[in-house]
């Protein structure tokens, strides 16, 4: 049997922000490119990034990804990057303007949900999110536990 080559049209996941789904209701999802330096791409391919506590800010008509930690590349020497630097996101201008209006009007926020490679390019999935209250988190945990219990009983039958 011949070895299968990786499909370039299928995304290769680098990292996911599971905490975002716990802390926020994700209303809509968008895809954006990331402007990266060379050693940052190599670190992301190794999976050395952290999306926890990161967010997206819109200033002067540009989207900026804040507080995403990308560890310095081991063999990068003097060409390494600042791990917490702000990174510009690449989207169409009309999408940015529409998102900016939604954020200001409805009090929503933009949270990075995952980083992946698609056709060799680094992409980030951004969620338009609304914060969960403590009782919402408790309700979600109760539903998850009830579903697990029902699945357990169905498996026994």
Image (tube, grey):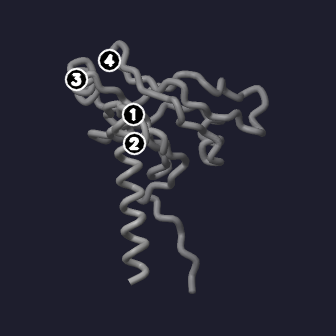
Residue 103 in picture, x, y percent from top left:
27, 23
Residue of label 1? 134
Q: Earlier in the sequence, mark 3 or mark 2?
A: 3
> Residue at 49% of width from left, 31% of height from top?
35
Q: Residue furthest bottom?
A: 1
Residue of label 4? 61
Residue of label 3? 106
Dot 1 and dot 2 residues touching (CB under 8 Å): yes
Residue of label 2? 138
Left or right of 148? Residue 74 is: right
Residue 33 in picture, x, y percent from top left:
42, 37
| Nearer the camera: disc 2 or disc 4 | 2
| Nearer the camera: disc 4 or disc 1 | 1
Quarter occupied by the N terminus: bottom right
> Residue at 44% of width from left, 23% of height from top?
64
Q: Earlier in the sequence, mark 1 or mark 3?
A: 3
> Residue at 31% of width from left, 41% of height from top?
29
Q: Quadrant of residue 63?
A: top left
Q: Quadrant of residue 105?
A: top left
Q: Earlier in the sequence, mark 3 or mark 4?
A: 4
Dot 3 and dot 4 residues touching (CB under 8 Å): no
Nearer to the camera, 60 or 19: 19
Q: CA distance from mark 2 to mark 4?
A: 37 Å
In terms of secondary structure, where does tag 4 sit?
loop
């Amino acid at each position: 049997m011949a070895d299968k080559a990786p499909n370039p049209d299928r995304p290769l996941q680098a990292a996911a922000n599971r905490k975002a789904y716990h802390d926020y209701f994700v209303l809509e999802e968008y895809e954006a490119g990331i402007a990266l330096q060379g050693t940052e791409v190599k670190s992301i391919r190794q999976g050395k990034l952290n999306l926890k506590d990161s967010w997206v800010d819109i200033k002067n008509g540009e989207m900026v990804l804040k507080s995403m930690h990308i560890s310095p590349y081991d063999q990068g020497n003097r060409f390494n990057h600042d791990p917490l630097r702000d990174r510009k996101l690449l989207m169409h201008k009309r999408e940015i303007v529409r998102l900016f209006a939604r954020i200001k009007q409805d009090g929503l926020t933009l949270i990075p949900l995952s980083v992946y490679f698609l056709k060799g390019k680094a992409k980030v999935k951004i969620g338009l999110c609304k914060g969960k209250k403590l009782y919402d988190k408790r309700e979600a945990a109760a539903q998850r536990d009830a579903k697990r219990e029902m699945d357990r009983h169905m498996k026994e039958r």
